Every structure is written in C-alpha cells, then in structure tokens.
Amino acid sequence: MDRASVSLSNVQKSYGNLPVVHGIDLDINEGDFVVFVGPSGCGKSTLLRMIAGLEEVTDGEISIKGRDVTDLDPSDRGIAMVFQSYALYPHMSVRDNLAFGLKMARTDAAEIRLRVDQAAAILKIDHLLDRRPGQLSGGQRQRVAIGRAIVRKPDVFLFDEPLSNLDAELRVSMRIEIARLHRELGNTMIYVTHDQTEAMTLADQIVVLRNGRVEQSGSPREIYENPSNIFVAGFIGSPRMNFLRSEYKGGGRFAIAGREFQAPEFDSKLPAGAEFMTGIRPEHLAVVDDADQAIAARVDFCEYLGGTRYLYCVLDDGQNLVVEQRTGPDIEPGMIINLDLSSNQRLFFNSDGARL
C-alpha cells in the first residue's frame, strides 16, 4: 500500500460566530501513527472530521499526499475512517459487510474476494466471515469495522475513539492489535482519543489539544518528560503530575509549605517572593528516613495495586500529592513520612502555566 503524508495549514473551524478550531498548523509524516488527545470539547474529533471531509473547513488548507483535499468529497480523499460505533449491517454476513463498499464502487468480484480474504487474514477473522454481527463479540465487531477500512486500501486511516465502547481488558488487547496492524500495513494513521494511556502506547507523535489549539506536539517520551506547560504536564500521566505551590526565595532557593529547598537548575529572573508551581511526578518522589531536601507529609490513603502502591499525602499547608512506590516497608494511613524532593525530574511553571 502507498503511504501518505497529511498537512494542515492554518486550519480553522467556526459554527456561526463561534470559533472551535483556531488556526492549526500540523505536518504528519508518511507512515506515522499520530494521536490527537485532549479533554472533551478540545476540538480533536472536529479536526479529524475536517481531515475526513465530514466537516467543512472554515479557513485554511488540508493536503493529503501533497494534494489539496480541502474541498473534496470524503470518497475522493484516499481515506478510510473507523468510528466509535461499529456501524455494521446486521442482516449481512461479515464477508458481505467487508465487501459492501467495494461492491458499491463496482469493484471486480475477484478483486473483492482477494481484498476481503487478505483483510480477514490480517485481522484473524477468517473463521468469522459467514457469521452476522449479532453473533460477534464487541472486539470482533471492531475488527470487522477496521477490516472494512482495510479493504479500501486507503492512503490514510482515521480512527475516532474506536475503543471507547469496549471493556477495559478488551481495550488493552485491541490496542495491541491496532499497533500490530500499523506495523504490518505501514500506512499513515490518525487516531483520536481522550484516553492518554492509548495515546502513550500507540503514538509515534502525540498532538495535545485544548480549546481548539495545539498545546504541544511530539513523541510520547518528549511529551511526558518535557511538557511545554502545566496543562500538558497534568494531562499526560496517570496519576497526574503533582503541582505544589512554591515561593522563590532568591539565590537559587525556593520554599514549599514553609520548607526551603535548593534548586541549582532553577535559572529564573523571578524576584524574591514570586509564586510559581513545582511539578514532580509520583514516581519521582522517594520516601526517605531523613534528607536535606525532604519534606514531611501525612499519609491520608494507601492504594495497593499489587506491584505498585500509591500513597495519597497531605502537606502541612494542606496541599495534596501522590507518591508511587514499588518497594519498601508497609505504610499505613495516618503515618508521617519524609519525601525527597531533590529529583532532577522537577519542573517549574510560572503563574500563567508556562515552563520556567
């Protein structure tokens, strides 16, 4: 299959006088798996539907494989879309569901059989071809929906929250299936989800959206380890990053809950007394007996998940934070523990949420 690149230039969308997508510029490389992620109402599905041709573009340009498709019908764009709902024809067999679009396009019967058999083999649904959708599990129906896209041999696959109707265990297995599918086919894939775990596990490139704007775009590791602002830092990661109110004391020192710490990496022109936020992820907090860079916290709740334990803690000034533990002695609610804040993984954000 040919692979394709997708380019968005100043893409905007308004409903009447209400703008919902604000001038997005984005280049997607050939063969990449790109995930649009963000909270509900951030514009990710609207953006995907504009790429698909299901929503008109108010302004800007969309090109696929170097061809301007902004005003083309969906059928002329070289895309195939997999929706949240399977949208299968209940009275048809799986084979007929897979073949339906090709029949409507008057594709040769031998070619239809070949494509359907190939897609069924890729998705391991060969044994289901004579069944009807009502005889299939949710995961099997989603495979059929994906197979219906595969038989079209599109330049770009578009996925709109395809796993949200599945239970947790099935979502994990289908994530693996979709990742395998991308490796085998090599097509460009654009995937929309509100689930940051899906984004982290599937994507070559994550595009984090908020209020119709791109907050940050990059690899999963870049987004996780080097977020550009406090929104991205808090949205990507589960449990989310801890954000602690802090005060700059000058001379490379700052205070949290009345306790002062050194920050040799803190290169800022903030005046003494300025307030900001210190961000540190739960896995970067260590419980210690005593340390110069430690702060006392009361354990409010312990969440035991087998190999991992989460401690929900409260500082003296009432601020909350979460600590991830994989080893160590048992810790009970009500205990006072010392948390080492000297991690070089600390991040600092100003009052507007931008990285310092």
Image (cartoon, helix red, strand yellow):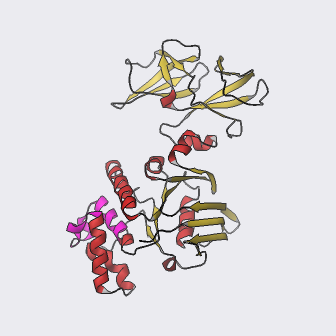
Give coordinates of residue 315: x percent, y percent: 57, 21
Q: Is residue 134 visible?
A: yes
- State the residue in front, 156 or 247: 156
Give me the residue at 32% from left, 64% from top: 143
Q: Assign the C terminus to one quadrant of the image.
A: top right
Which of the 4 image quarters holds residue 211? Answer: bottom right
Give me the residue at 38% from left, 23% from top: 327
Drawn side of residue 57 relative to residue 193, left or right: right
Give coordinates of residue 26: x percent, y percent: 61, 60
Q: Is residue 136 magenta?
A: yes
- State the residue in front, 304 or 8: 8
Q: Can you say whether 94 is above or below 143 in the image?
A: below
Give me the residue at 52% from left, 71% from top: 52
Drawn side of residue 85 relative to residue 41, left or right: left
Q: Can you say whether 110 is above or below 36 in the image?
A: below
Drawn side of residue 48 relative to residue 136, left or right: right
Q: Which residues are magenta?
A: 123-147
What secondary structure prevails in the magenta region?
helix
Furthest-top residue in this view: 290
Which of the 4 image quarters holds residue 296? Answer: top right
Q: Is residue 91 visible?
A: no
Drawn side of residue 212 relative to residue 138, left or right: right
Q: Assign the N terminus to one quadrant of the image.
A: bottom left
Q: Can you say whether 113 is above or below 18 in the image?
A: below
Give coordinates of residue 183: x percent, y percent: 38, 59
- State the residue in front, 281 or 264: 264
Q: Is residue 126 magenta?
A: yes
Give coordinates of residue 149: x percent, y percent: 39, 71
